[in-house]
Structures are given as structure tokens and as C-alpha cells.
Image (cartoon, rainbow, N blue to C red):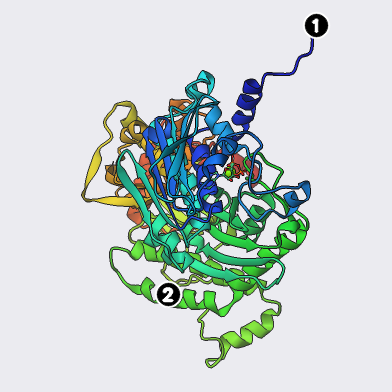
């Protein structure tokens, strides 16, 4: 064994840098936090090539005095705490004194700064951890940090950088988190000379959320506020029909710091239990303010996770507040105000019926949570009681079995004649010349061997899957060009993933283009999915892309997307089919390569052979 020797400082610093600085977005996060800590009211972020070439952040904060510049880039030097005790009461975002040193270690860094007290500014350049001389320079009050050629001296890290779009997606996300946490600060984000975000200071948090995520998101936000004086909870959760396939849109801020916290994510899911399908996640923008000594923020190198003194109390506060909110008049008012739109026959009728479904689930759920159901019934019956009608006219009162209703959120291309809103009592069997639909979910048909019971959703899913796959393999998915391309605003990481997968999407017949910021333009969609809204389709596909995790094989991914699309496009259990639809579905069954299994592997049909029936009826 060779002798044990201390590592040279440059190696130590590179190791430390690796912990804090993982990719350009980490630089953006650290520098933004420094600017916030410096009391800036305006912060401009400018990035070239996803941040791998240049990241420049300028602020109008307190600045750094000339004789402090060298210290600012030295490791473990900070102006934010002095004593170990203060670690447990930090009010600033930074306190480790590591970020600038780490960044400077793995890049070409230029720091320019001027305090209000000084007439001239000063400048310091650091290349791969080697600091030059501090020299005077002209600059406005505040600080500008330029970071070029990130990881130029750590080729392994550089090699791991993903495409410009992906890195930029992460940068936008880091930017969004800080911008959300500090609505009172004016932020801008520019990429390759193009302005992506211009966020003037706002009083109202919803306005900031809207600037970042678009008006649809803002319109679906439900304000929430807790009542624990020690743990002040406020913010918004989103209408259940704005759910996502992952928890990336759950923004939690603790004392102005963005955090991820499993137990709070769990509380959110609990609060939405019964309102969302399995695998769907609520959207939330929540702020928690509590005394700093109640949390330890020094448990994660990038301070992304924290440890609460009393985690249970915060969990209950969040869950309790949301539950109460969902039961409150405010939510029922939402139910009522939107219910009026379900009756119209406009182009959005399908959308509206989907929304109506969700609202019903909300109300049903809320009813289930009320302490005394009989008291509730009284209210329900009395005309002067609750202003809410629990049974809107389009309510199917009896035939919505809970698990099946779970996958009924999308459009139903085959069943144009049967609106989900059709009111009818227990389902009567439906006759087609060659089959019978029972319970709005199974088809009973006869074939040469015996009686076949078919799961309408599973079979239709299989049919669509095979047709689409066939066309993709032959390279000609017929596409439908939209008269007016549709804009879809996504979360930064989602937009990046969609653009990364552009080619794959084109194979599926979905053409997307960047449209500034995190908005994409969808210009075509697969013609055979004419009844699915293209924007919705893209969202679903992107979720699938992101939930893949590790880089899946291209073919697998395509197959996954095919599964997803067919499942969305297929008729659902609970959909009434017309006689023609039943016939058409059965004809397609004969053409299927594997008519026996849905793409997920569930059987599409059960066969009771004549022999078996004979045996059971003791004929033989
Ligand atoms: P930390 O933020 O943990 O203190 P950093 O390495 O990020 O460590 O920064 C080191 C020090 O440099 C800070 O404590 C602060 O005094 C100073 N500093 C860094 N960025 C700025 C800025 N934008 N404006 C004013 N001072 C800054
Ligand atoms: Mg810092």
C-alpha cells in the first residue's frame, strides 16, 4: 500500500465542485441565490449554448468590495455566517462559502463588482481555480459573474453534458424555481440572445406563476392558506384535471428556498386521493414560512432537501389545509360555475364532458369526506340549503364503478353517438346484429367454438395499437396538418424532452417546433387519432418520455408511446357503443394479429366453448 498523503487543494476543490456543480443549471442556481442574498431587485441571466459556453448573471445587489473579491472565490469563505451556531438559524440562501470557489475551479470565471460606497468597480478573473490580480474596472453597482467553458478541465463532466436543449431545460427550471420563490424581484432569462422570460416584479404570486407557466395553469389554481401560526402555509394547488404524470410540477418553497420533500409530496397525493387516477400527480405551488431554527437546511450539498424538527406537524398541516379547502364553499363554487358549460354542443363539448366527470368526482369525493352524510343529504334536498346541485343533469347516477371511471379522462373516438353525459339508469344490454353490449363494457358474441365475452376497451386498444404500429413500421403514418398550429406551454424540462425526441415524435406523426420559451408548436398529429386533442396528446407523450428515467431503447420508447396513445384513444369501460360501433369493433377483431390480448397483456376476450357450457349444464 503506498503512503497516505493529503490530497492537493486543487484535487479537493474539484471533488467538492463535483458535489455542488453538476451541470450548467447548478451554476445558474448558485449564482441566482447569491444575487438574491445580495438584496438585488433586478437579476438578469444570459446563457449561451445551454450554459456550456457562457453563463452571465448580473444583479443590482450590495456588491463586493475590491479587497473582498479574492475571498469571495476562496473555498469556505462566506459573509453569511460566522459561528457554527448560526448554521441552525440561517436566513440566507447560501452559507457554505463553496459555490463561487467550486464554479471557479471548473471554468473560466470573471467576477465584476461595485458596492454603493465605491466609485469604481473591480474585477477578478479565475481560470480553473487560479485567481489573477484584482484590477479596477468600470461597472454599475452590483455584481456580474461570467462563467465560460464550464468543465473545460474536467473532461468527464463535460462529456456528460446533454444536448443544448436539455441543458437549457434544466437552466430554465433552475431559473423558474428562484423566480417563483421571489416574485418581488425583476428577473430576465435570455438564451442565445433570445429573451425567454421577462418577469417584472409582482405583488400577486399567481401573476408570476402565469408568466412562467401560462394562462391555462393560472386559471386552474386554487388558493390555499393554512392556519398554524408557527408553520405558515400559503399558495396554490391546481384543479385535479390539470394533473401530471410525474411530480415535477410540485413546487415547494421553504423560507424562500425551493425544496423537494418526500413527506410533503406524499401529503399532496393523500389530499388528492380519489381525485386523481393512479399514476397522476397533483400540481402545486406552496410556500412554507417557519422559524429557521425549526429546519436544518444543511443536509444536502445543493440544499435541495431539508430536515424538519417536526415533520409530522408540517405533514398534517398541509394535508389538513388541503382537505379543508377541497371541502370548502370555494371549491364547490368552482364546481358550480363551470358546470354551466357542460350543456353546450360546441367543439369543446368533449372537453367539457371530461371536466364534468372530474367535477363530479370532486363532489362525490367531497361528499364522502363530510363527517355526517345524513346531514349532508338534508342540505342536498332543501332548495334553500347548499347552493350546489350535487347531481348536474348530465350525471350518470348508477353506473359509474369507481375503478373504471379512473381511466375515463380522454376522448372517445368511436362513440360519437353516445355522450358520456347521457343520463340513463342501470345499463340495458345493447344489441348489434352479431353481439350484445352489457354493462357498457363487455360485448358478448358467438363464434364457431362457443360464446365470447370481449372487453371493449382492451380490444379497441389492441386494434388501434396494431394499426398504428403497422403504419409506423411501414413508415407512413398519415398525418393531419393543423390549420392553425397549436401552441402548448410546458414545464422547462418537458419542453426540452419533447424537442430532444422530435424525430421520434415525427415518426408517430406528431411534428413539434420550438416557439420561444417553453412553448412548443404542434403542427401535425396522426390522422387516425383525429379525435384526440393534439395539445393533450403531446402532453401525454411528453410525460411518457420523462417517466422513462434511464435512456430507454428507441424501439421500446416508441412501443411505450404506442401503448399510451392506444389506451387514450380507445373506448373506455362505461362507454355506450352504437350498434355500428360494436360491429366495426368486432370486424377489426378478426383482422388483429393478437386479438387475445390488449397491448398491456390483459386478455381482450374470454371464450366459453360450447363443450364447456354443455358440460356445465350437465348435458354431457
Ligand atoms: P455563500 O453564498 O455560501 O456565502 P458563495 O461562494 O456563493 O458562498 O459566495 C461567497 C461570498 O461571496 C458570499 O458570502 C458573498 O459575500 C459574496 N458574493 C457572492 N456573490 C455575490 C453577489 N452576487 N453579490 C454580493 N456578494 C456576493
Ligand atoms: Mg452562494
Find disc 1 in the rendering and name its residue. Answer: 1
> How many numbered marks appear?
2
Q: Residue furthest left?
A: 483
Residue 566 visible somewhere in the drawing: no
The image position of residue 318, as x and y in percent, is 66, 63
Q: Is residue 489 visible?
A: yes
Q: Residues within 10 Å of mark 1 (few under 14, many from 20)?
A: few
Which image quadrant: the C terminus?
top right
Q: Mark 2 to mark 1: distance in Å?
A: 76 Å
The residue closer to the viewer here, 459 or 251, is 251
Disc 2 residue lies near ligand 2 with CB under 8 A: no
Can you tell which quarter of the image residue 422 is in?
bottom left
> Residue 152 appears at what percent x and percent y?
47, 22
Secondary structure beneath dot 2 equals helix
Of the 4 image quadrants, the one containing the N terminus is top right
Q: Which residue lies under the disc numbered 2?
A: 339
**Residue positioned 38% across, 47% down in the render:** 189
- Judged left or right of residue 164, residue 347 is left
Does residue 186 sit above or below 526 in this rendering?
A: below
Mark number, residue 342? none
Coordinates of residue 351 in the picture (x, y in percent): 37, 62
Q: Is residue 20 above or below residue 6?
A: below
Query: Label 1 CB, ligand 1: below 8 Å?
Result: no
Q: What is the quadrant of residue 14 in the picture?
A: top right
Q: Secondary structure at mark 1?
A: loop
Q: Nearer the viewer, residue 504 or 401?
A: 504
For the point 42% across and 46% down, the residue is 120
* Mark closer to the observer (2, 1): 1
Position of residue 562 measured from the top left corner of the image (x, y, whole percent): 42, 37
Identify the mark nearer the N-term, 2 or 1: 1
Amino acid at each position: 500500500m503506498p503512503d497516505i498523503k493529503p490530497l492537493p487543494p486543487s484535487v479537493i476543490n474539484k471533488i467538492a465542485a463535483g458535489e455542488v456543480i453538476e451541470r450548467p443549471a447548478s451554476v445558474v442556481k448558485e449564482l441566482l441565490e447569491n444575487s438574491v442574498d445580495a438584496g438585488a431587485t433586478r437579476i438578469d441571466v444570459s446563457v449561451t449554448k445551454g450554459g456550456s459556453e457562457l453563463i452571465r448573471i448580473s444583479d443590482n445587489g450590495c456588491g463586493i468590495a475590491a479587497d473582498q473579491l479574492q475571498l469571495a472565490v476562496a473555498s469556505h469563505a462566506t459573509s453569511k455566517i460566522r459561528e457554527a451556531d448560526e448554521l441552525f438559524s440561517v436566513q440566507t440562501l447560501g452559507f457554505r462559502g463553496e459555490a463561487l470557489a467550486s464554479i471557479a475551479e471548473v471554468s473560466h470565471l470573471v467576477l465584476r463588482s461595485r458596492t454603493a460606497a465605491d466609485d469604481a468597480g473591480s474585477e477578478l478573473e479565475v481560470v480553473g481555480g487560479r485567481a489573477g490580480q484584482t484590477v479596477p474596472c468600470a461597472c454599475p453597482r452590483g455584481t456580474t459573474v461570467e462563467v465560460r467553458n464550464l468543465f473545460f478541465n474536467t473532461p468527464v463532466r463535460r462529456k456528460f453534458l446533454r444536448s443544448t436543449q436539455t441543458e437549457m431545460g434544466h437552466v430554465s427550471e433552475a431559473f423558474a424555481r428562484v423566480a417563483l420563490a421571489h416574485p418581488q424581484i425583476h428577473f430576465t432569462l435570455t438564451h442565445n440572445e433570445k429573451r425567454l422570460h421577462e418577469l417584472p416584479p409582482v405583488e400577486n404570486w399567481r401573476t408570476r406563476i402565469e408568466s412562467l407557466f401560462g394562462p391555462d395553469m393560472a386559471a386552474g389554481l386554487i388558493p390555499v392558506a393554512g392556519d398554524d401560526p408557527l408553520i405558515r402555509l400559503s399558495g396554490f394547488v391546481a384543479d385535479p384535471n390539470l394533473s401530471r404524470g410525474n411530480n415535477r410540477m410540485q413546487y415547494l418553497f421553504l423560507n424562500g428556498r425551493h425544496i423537494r420533500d418526500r413527506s410533503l409530496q406524499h401529503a399532496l397525493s393523500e389530499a388528492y386521493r380519489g381525485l386523481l387516477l393512479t399514476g397522476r400527480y397533483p400540481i402545486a405551488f406552496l410556500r412554507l414560512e417557519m422559524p429557521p431554527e425549526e429546519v436544518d437546511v444543511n443536509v444536502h450539498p445543493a440544499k435541495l432537501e431539508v430536515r424538519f424538527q417536526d415533520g409530522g406537524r408540517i405533514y398534517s398541516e398541509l394535508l389538513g389545509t388541503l382537505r379543508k379547502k377541497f371541502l370548502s364553499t370555494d371549491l364547490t363554487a368552482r364546481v358550480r360555475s363551470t358546470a354551466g358549460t357542460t350543456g353546450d354542443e360546441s367543439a369543446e363539448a368533449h372537453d367539457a364532458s371530461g371536466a364534468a366527470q372530474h367535477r363530479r368526482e370532486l363532489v362525490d369525493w367531497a361528499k364522502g369526506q363530510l363527517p355526517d352524510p345524513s346531514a349532508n343529504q338534508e342540505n342536498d334536498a332543501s332548495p334553500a340549503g347548499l347552493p350546489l346541485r350535487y347531481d348536474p343533469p348530465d350525471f350518470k347516477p348508477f353506473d359509474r364503478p369507481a375503478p373504471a371511471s379512473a381511466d375515463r379522462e380522454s376522448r372517445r373516438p368511436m362513440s360519437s353517438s353516445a355522450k358520456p353525459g347521457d343520463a340513463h339508469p342501470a345499463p340495458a344490454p345493447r344489441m348489434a346484429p352479431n353481439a350484445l353490449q352489457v354493462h357498457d363494457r363487455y360485448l358478448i358474441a358467438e363464434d364457431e367454438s362457443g360464446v365470447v365475452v370481449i372487453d371493449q376497451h382492451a380490444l379497441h386498444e389492441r386494434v388501434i395499437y396494431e394499426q398504428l404500429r403497422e403504419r409506423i413500421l411501414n413508415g407512413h403514418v398519415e398525418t393531419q396538418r393543423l390549420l392553425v398550429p397549436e401552441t402548448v406551454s410546458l414545464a422547462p424540462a418537458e419542453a426540452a424532452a419533447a424537442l430532444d425526441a422530435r424525430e421520434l415524435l415525427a415518426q408517430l406523426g406528431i411534428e413539434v417546433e420550438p416557439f420561444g420559451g417553453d412553448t412548443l408548436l404542434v403542427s401535425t398529429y396522426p390522422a387516425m387519432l383525429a379525435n384526440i386533442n393534439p395539445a393533450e396528446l403531446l402532453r401525454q407523450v411528453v410525460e411518457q418520455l420523462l417517466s422513462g428515467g434511464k435512456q430507454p431503447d428507441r424501439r421500446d420508447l416508441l412501443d411505450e408511446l404506442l401503448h399510451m396513445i392506444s389506451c387514450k384513444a380507445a373506448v373506455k369501460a362505461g362507454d355506450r357503443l352504437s350498434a355500428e360501433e360494436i360491429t366495426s369493433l368486432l370486424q377489426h377483431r378478426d383482422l388483429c394479429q393478437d386479438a387475445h390480448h390488449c397491448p398491456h397483456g390483459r386478455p381482450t376476450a374470454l371464450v366459453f366453448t360450447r363443450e364447456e357450457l354443455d358440460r356445465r349444464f350437465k348435458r354431457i
